[in-house]
Amino acid sequence: MTTTTTIVTAGDRTIRRSSRRVEPIYYVFLLPSLVLFTLAITVPGVIGIFFSFTDSIGIGDWSFNGLTNYIALFSDPAILQSYLFTFGFSIATVIVVNVIAFLLAVGLTSRIRMKTGLRAVFVIPMVISGIIIAYVFNFLFSNSLPALGSALGIEWLQTSLLANPDLAWTAIVAVTAWQAIPGTLLIYIAGLLSVPGDVYEAADIDGASKLQQLTRITLPLVAGYVVINVILGFKGFLNAYDIIVGLTNGGPGTATRSIAMTIITGFNGGDYAYQMANATIFFIVAILISLLQLSLTRGRNAL
């Protein structure tokens, strides 16, 4: 990219105008990524939206049925349940992840011993596959914890949480948070390290307690990081699939079936057009959340 400067004389004033010209070589580097993105994402997405207005089962003949699939979505209790579960699960997980990650970040940026080693330990869950984590915790919830509950005489712990329709979601939140906390933790550490140390020294001189420094100095100065972590985390948890499959497979019944799991299950069950309409609605929801993210982070240069 090159910059050219044009000098324009208007009466007694001299005005400098700068214009940027993009070198053609940049377009050459951009073209392969643009073609791959179009072929792998844009074209399939457009085709999917097209078929959402049909009665296609994924193969064979099909015909247009207009908005029938979309109208049916809003009266389908299974679809509404999946949206309710997904949004409730996402909100609960966002809160758990951000509270724990922020507190850990505060501890790992303070003057404690072995904080570098502890940071390495805390980020280990981030590099493990979600389905592997889910199967490991499935064994713990189904065997280890009930055995522990029987040994300690704790009645509610003697049966697997994953088999309880009212508590299975808590196990999913716990496992998802265990994997998501490291990524959020790293962002908070970066934000805390960007806060000037002079601010805390001045607060100490003024007699501010550690709690006051945390609530009146640290939190306001890392607010941009909090917003970014909340929005990115919420968007990511809306797509929850692998951990849910490994833990409950959407059960008991359909109590923990997420939107992504409902869509994929419908594809495999020959309900292609109907679930494609569901996917289109979900895509619109994701777009709206992305626009919300842009509006909330506009003007923030935290990252």
Image (cartoon, helix red, strand yellow):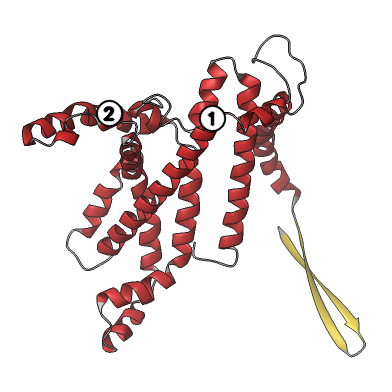
Lateral position of residue 20 relative to residue 283, left or right: right
- Where residue 222 appears, x then y in whole percent? 42, 67
Residue toward you, 243 or 189: 243
Residue at label 1?
A: 77
Residue 67 shows in this picture: yes
Question: Which residue shows up at 53% across the image and 30% down it?
Answer: 77
- Where residue 35 appears, x then y in whole percent? 69, 34
- Where residue 71 appears, x then y in whole percent? 68, 30
Relative to residue 262, is residue 204 depicted above or below? Answer: below
Q: Which mark is residue 138?
A: 2
Which quadrant holds the N terminus? bottom right
Specify the amino acid type for callout 2.
Answer: Asn
Question: Which residue shows up at 70% across the image and 39% down it?
Answer: 31
Identity of the residue furthest to the top in this view: 60
Lateral position of residue 206 relative to residue 58, left or right: left
Lateral position of residue 215 relative to residue 289, left or right: left
First of labels 2, 1 by sequence position: 1
Mark 1 residue element: helix
Quadrant position of residue 148: top left
